[in-house]
Image (cartoon, helix red, strand yellow):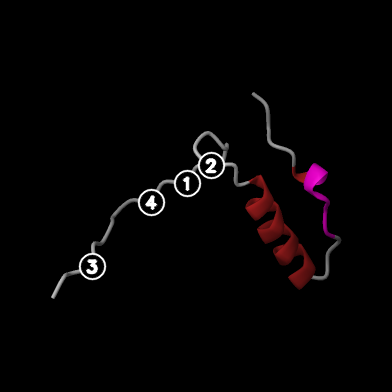
Amino acid sequence: MKRMMTYDTYIFDLDGTLLDTLGDLAASANYALRTNHLPEHSIDGHTPLRW
């Protein structure tokens, strides 16, 4: 039987250098807002930060 690998560290790519996840992050943020009866934002309201 093959054992499942476990990890001690998780890395998040929140700036979009590896994957374009803005849509997924915006949907998650809107879900949290909706669940707490707060106004949602359009995808344009979730624009990435530019340093």
- Residue 7 appears left or right of 16: left
Tag 4 secondary structure: loop
Q: Nearer the viewer, mark 2 or mark 4?
A: 2
State the image coordinates of residue 35 (x, y, percent, origin top left): 75, 72
> Where does label 3 land, which residue?
4
Secondary element type, mark 1: loop
Image quadrant holding the C terminus, namely top right
Q: Are marks 1 and 4 in contact (CB under 8 Å)?
A: yes
Outermost residue on the bottom side: it is: 1
Mark 2 packing: few (<14 Cα in 10 Å), some, or many (20+)?
few
Q: Nearer the viewer, mark 4 or mark 3?
A: 3
Residue 5 location in percent, x, y? 23, 62
Residue 32: percent from left, percent from top: 70, 65
Residue closest to the eye, 33 or 19:
19
Q: State the CA–CA distance, disc 1 to disc 4.
A: 7 Å
Q: Secondary structure at mark 3?
A: loop
Residue beneath label 2, please?
19
- Displayed quadrant of residue 15: top right
Contact, mark 2 vs mark 4 (Cβ under 8 Å): no
Q: Going 28% across and 57% down the picture, which residue do you hit? A: 7
- CA gap, disc 2 and disc 4: 15 Å
Say which label, 2 or 4, has the lower sequence index. 4
Extent of the magenta region: 40-45
Residue denoted by label 4: 10
- What kind of residue is marked 1? Phe
Give the residue drawn at x 53%, y 33%: 17
Q: CA distance from mark 3 to mark 2?
A: 25 Å
Question: Which numbered mark, 3 or 1, is in the foreground of this view?
Answer: 3
Residue that mark 1 sits on: 12
